[in-house]
Image (cartoon, rainbow, N blue to C red):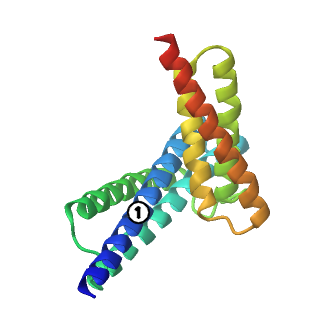
Amino acid sequence: KQWYQRRVRDEHQREMLDEFQASLQYCQAIREAANLIEKPFSATDFKDKIKLHQKLMLCQKSEAVLSATIHTAKQQLFAKKLSPSKTFKDVLYSVYGEFCAVHDMKVVLEKEIPAGDEPAGACPEEVLLAFAFEQIRSGILDENYGHLGECIKRYRLSLALIMGLLSEVKSENDRHILLKYETGLHIRIDNLHGRRKAAL
């Protein structure tokens, strides 16, 4: 019986660590996307204002996901459902470090946007999906011009965002569409790695 309970605990520990790692990678991709959205020239120009808000929305989303991850980890630890192993501590430190980084970025953006000045626009998930598709299109151009390194980077970022969105999506139709993109990106990245190795 003790052996079985230990096995269940170990399995739960692995599952939760995988979940925390997935949240961390998703949020790192979100922050990278926020950084890659073109820096606005003016906080008063309408198009630039939208870009500022998109960057802020992504920071707010990432901060919320990371905060929930930290809260879950603490709850699980205090309930003794997780053990404070070195791997657990390393993952949690990384999650907290990402939380601090995205919080600092959010604070800077909030100072650039006047209070109450929030134009109606897309939700962060729509911004992320549009950004992922834009990266895929740019990656296809890079691939056609032989810029394989840059192409792989774009595809990987798109894949990280799509995998994160898959963990949140509720609609089966949306899930089906995202799964098709996930599968396609995995195949393209593997093929490009093969091409790079063959060229060496």
Q: Is residue 113 visible?
A: no
Residue 93: quarter of image: bottom left
Residue at image coords 70%, 52%: 178
Residue furthest to the top in view is: 200
Q: Nearer the viewer, residue 177 or 2?
A: 2
The local crowd at label 1, few if under 14, some if 14 to 19, many if 20 or more residues have their Cα within 10 Å, is many
Q: Which image quarter is the C terminus in? A: top left
Please state if 179 lies on the left or on the right of 193 as rendered: right
In the rendered picture of this protein, how many numbered marks are placed on residues?
A: 1
The image position of residue 141, as x and y in percent, is: 69, 22
Q: Quadrant of residue 68?
A: bottom left
94 w.r.t. 171: above or below: above
Check disc 1 and give the amino acid type. Phe
Quadrant where the N terminus lies?
bottom left
Please tell me which residue lies in front, 85 or 112: 85
Name the spot of residue 196 as percent of width and height, x first: 51, 18
Residue under label 1, please give it.
20
Who's the residue at 67% across and 64% down the image?
A: 169
